[in-house]
Image (cartoon, helix red, strand yellow):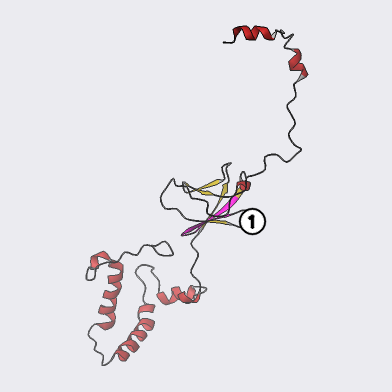
């Protein structure tokens, strides 16, 4: 699998039935451009083929597109060299809500993020080999993309701080509700001697 997610499958040579489109182009050049012609040098051959491509092949009506290749290229707004631009980043962007356990689910796999992100929406970028989780201006969390399904990635960064559960004043001891106590009625008072009698 290459950078663009395409798996190259090579065909055996001299097996035209496994790659008909390619072999059809070769057949067209042999029968139209080269049939019955001889050349004294490779330079003469290349010069002839260049002229043939421009004045014959590019001016014919293509069997698949049903238009002249020269007209199709002329209609293109912008054509640049393949090696004149950086490769396209193959990615997909999705939004996920971080659950309470701070593990974001992506393609049935789970990736950890800081606990403080729990309950918030994050942007997940799925690259070819990485998973990038973004939340606002925070530093993105990057994981290696897991292969397979139902797997859990491990946290490899510094320890994740736990969220604060209480931000107010220190906890006070519980208080009884007077209305609830009033409904209980009188409580029987017993002497401690009774407990000593039943104790083993």
Closer to the camera in the image, 35 or 41: 41
* Residue at the far bottom in the pictured view: 40
Magenta segment: does it hold 197? no
* Residue occupying the point 48% across, 62% down: 90
Specify the segment rendered in magenta: 122-137
**Residue name at image x 67 percent, y 7 percent:** 193
Quarter of the figure that contains the N terminus: bottom left
| Residue 45 placement: quadrant | bottom left
Residue that badge 1 annotates: 138
Tell me, yes or no, if residue 120 can be seen here. Answer: no
Judged left or right of residue 157, residue 61 is left
Question: Element type at marker 1?
Answer: loop
Horizontally, is 11 left or right of 196 in the view?
left
As rendered, which of 194 and 136 lies closer to the eye? 194
Q: Quadrant of the C terminus?
A: top right
Indicate whether 199 appears above or below 37.
above
Residue 65 screen position, x and y as percent: 39, 68
In the rendered view, does 35 fall on the left or right side of 92? Answer: left
In the image, residue 126 lies in the stretch drawn in magenta: yes
Residue at the location (75% across, 24% down)? 175
Compare residues 113 and 59 and report the one nearer the observer: 113
């Amino acid at each position: 699998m290459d950078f663009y997610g395409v798996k190259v499958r090579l065909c055996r040579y001299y097996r035209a039935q496994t790659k008909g489109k390619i072999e059809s182009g070769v057949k067209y050049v042999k029968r139209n451009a080269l049939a019955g012609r001889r050349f004294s040098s490779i330079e003469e051959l290349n010069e002839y083929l260049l002229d043939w491509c421009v004045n014959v092949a590019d001016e014919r009506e293509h069997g698949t597109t049903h238009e002249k290749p020269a007209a199709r290229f002329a209609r293109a707004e912008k054509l640049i060299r393949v090696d004149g631009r950086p490769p396209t980043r193959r990615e997909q962007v999705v939004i996920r809500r971080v659950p309470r356990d701070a593990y974001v689910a992506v393609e049935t796999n789970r990736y950890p993020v800081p606990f403080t992100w729990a309950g918030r929406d994050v942007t997940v970028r799925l690259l070819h080999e990485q998973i990038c989780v973004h939340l606002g201006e925070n530093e993105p969390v990057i994981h290696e993309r897991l292969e397979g399904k139902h797997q859990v990635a491990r946290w490899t960064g510094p320890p994740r701080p736990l969220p604060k559960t209480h931000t107010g004043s220190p906890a006070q001891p519980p208080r009884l509700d007077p209305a609830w106590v009033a409904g209980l009625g009188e409580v029987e008072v017993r002497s401690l001697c009774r407990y000593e009698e039943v104790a083993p």
